[in-house]
Amino acid sequence: MDKLAQYRQIIQELLLEYAAGNPLGGEIESQTVFDQQTDRYLLVDLGWKGQRRIYSCLIHLEIRGEKIWIQRNQTDCSLTDELLAKGVLKEDIVLGLQPTELRKYTGLGVI
């Protein structure tokens, strides 16, 4: 399996794990969005909590140039650590949620 296919599989499995562990319950569900044409992957919570509409993008990952970009992480977990544990190379993880000038201090991939 080539690296791109491997990274797609890792991301999809990770997001499915998060979706299955939805702590909100009730009328709120976690949905995964896998767009392999543009290599964008999302985990979204949506539904109702009483009279309040819930819609939140918890995780947004992208693959750009064979690197995994973390664009959003609204969880208490370190996506970086989880990706590393699943075999993603340190230099292949980019913290897109950090300003460009700060990425060089993360010890991860830099663009």
Image (spheres, helix red, strand yellow):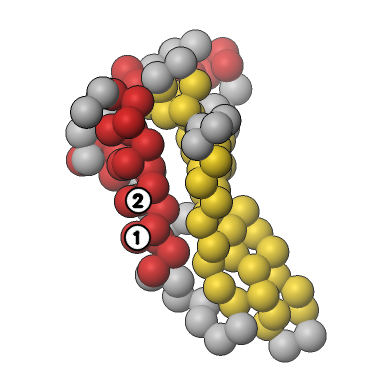
Amino acid on which the number 1 mark rests in the picture: Glu
Quickly name the residue at label 1: 17
Tell whether 68 sits left or right of 32.
Answer: left
**Which quadrant of the figure has residue 31?**
bottom right
* Residue 86, placed above or below residue 93: below
User: Is residue 77 or residue 22 the one in the foreground?
Assistant: 22
Amino acid on which the number 2 mark rests in the picture: Leu
User: Is residue 21 or residue 16 the one in the foreground?
Assistant: 16
Q: Is residue 51 visible?
A: yes
The reply to whether dot 2 and dot 1 touch (C-beta < 8 Å) is yes
Q: Is residue 73 visible?
A: no
* Residue 71, placed above or below residue 21: above
Circle 1 — which element? helix
Q: Give me the C-alpha separation between circle 2 and circle 1.
A: 5 Å
Q: Residue at x 79, y 85 (%)?
A: 51
Where's residue 28, x and y in %?
59, 77
Where's residue 35, x and y in %?
55, 41
Quickly name the residue at label 2: 14
Q: Residue at x 51, y 81 (%)?
A: 25
